[in-house]
Image (cartoon, rainbow, N blue to C red):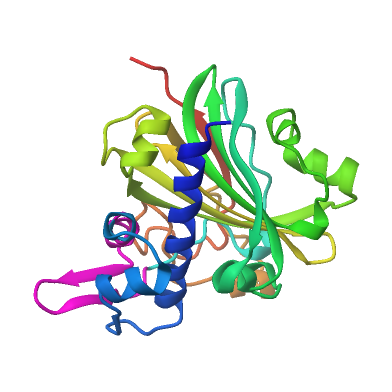
Amino acid sequence: MDREPARSALKRERVRDHLMELVESAAPGDPIPSERTLCEQLGVSRPTLRSAVDELVTNGLLIREHGRGMFVARAKITQELVPDASAHRLPQASGSWASRVLELTTVQAGARVGRKLRISPAAEITYIARLRLVDGEPMAIEYLHVPADLVPGLSPADMESGDFYDVLRDRHGVRVHEAVQSIEPTVTNEEEARLIGVPVLSPALLFERLTRDDTGRPVEYVHSVYRGDRYRIVSRLSLGDTPADGSAQAARFTGERHHPGIPPGDLSGRGDVPALMLGDVQPAE
């Protein structure tokens, strides 16, 4: 494993989590501590802190105001592709996928990850950073956080061969059931750009996912950065008319609605619009 990038990734991950905790616990417009104060609190250098701050500014979570400091940005508009009751399976992305583990270690969860996984901030988690490759070419970097007591003895080989969810089921008795995943545009920082082989500040997709097992227990929190030049998400929408039977379900979905890429009002009265998503790897030029 490439230890030096791994140590850097883990340190930056802890800084990012601390900043995200500040953002999520504050209101829009609230100030956050200065870079100098944060460096002292976290025991990191200013370039390390600034890299994480730059990411949150780029992603619209923080605002820098010259001479005034940094502030929490306004909340983003969230649009679900399908309602909770219509959750769907995500088809396999194209290409031959493989993984290379950059780091696998045990650390304390911390406040933000602990809250997501519903465990104590002092509880141990297994942290995995891995490079995802398609047809041998770097495509994404994944950062996984799993409660350590769920995966005793987890090894890099487990994360590089087969499906991690199969490993959870077959070796650890954990059956994943559902996940909530968000996708946002971002750009690569210097470390991400080097690992996936693109220029710094290249367009990318930021995925965040929280996975639960069949008892409703959170078992995995992941965030990933995918190459924007090679990866896209395609969705199919079913645009059939809502049944005009006067049923309670039909009435529930009547009214003006908005769907990604479709102007508000264009689907008024059509009710629920089921979607099917597909990850699509674009050919290299």
Tell me which residue sits at (18%, 76%) in the image: 69
Report the quarter where the C terminus lies.
Answer: top left
Nearest the viewer among 139 and 276 is 139
Rendered image quadrant of residue 117: bottom right
- Using the image as rendered, state which of residue 230 and residue 162 is in the foreground: 162
The image position of residue 283, as x and y in percent, is 42, 18
Describe residue 213's horizontal placement relative to residue 241 as left or right: right
Q: Quadrant of the N terminus?
A: top right
Identify the image quadrant of residue 32: bottom left
Compared with residue 236, is residue 54 higher up or lower down, i.e. above or below? Answer: below
From the viewer's perspective, tell me whether residue 171 is left or right of residue 65.
Answer: right
Q: Where residue 31 sits in the image (x, y, percent)? A: 27, 82
Residue 220, horizontal then vertical, whole percent: 68, 56
Confirm whether residue 11 shows in the render: yes
Q: Which residues are magenta?
A: 51-76
Camera-side residue of 142 and 94: 142
**Depicted 103 relative to depicted 75: above or below:** above
Name the residue: 79% across, 67% down: 216
State the image quarter where residue 94 is shown: top right
Give the residue displayed 42% in from the left and 24% down from the top.
Answer: 282
Which x, y percent locates residue 4?
Answer: 47, 38
Q: Residue at x 78, y 43 (%)?
A: 154
Q: Is residue 181 left or right of residue 263?
A: right
Residue 65 in the magenta stretch? The answer is yes
Q: Is residue 234 visible?
A: no
- Between residues 109 and 168, which one lies in front from this camera angle? 109
Residue farthest toward the left in the current orientation of the protein: 67
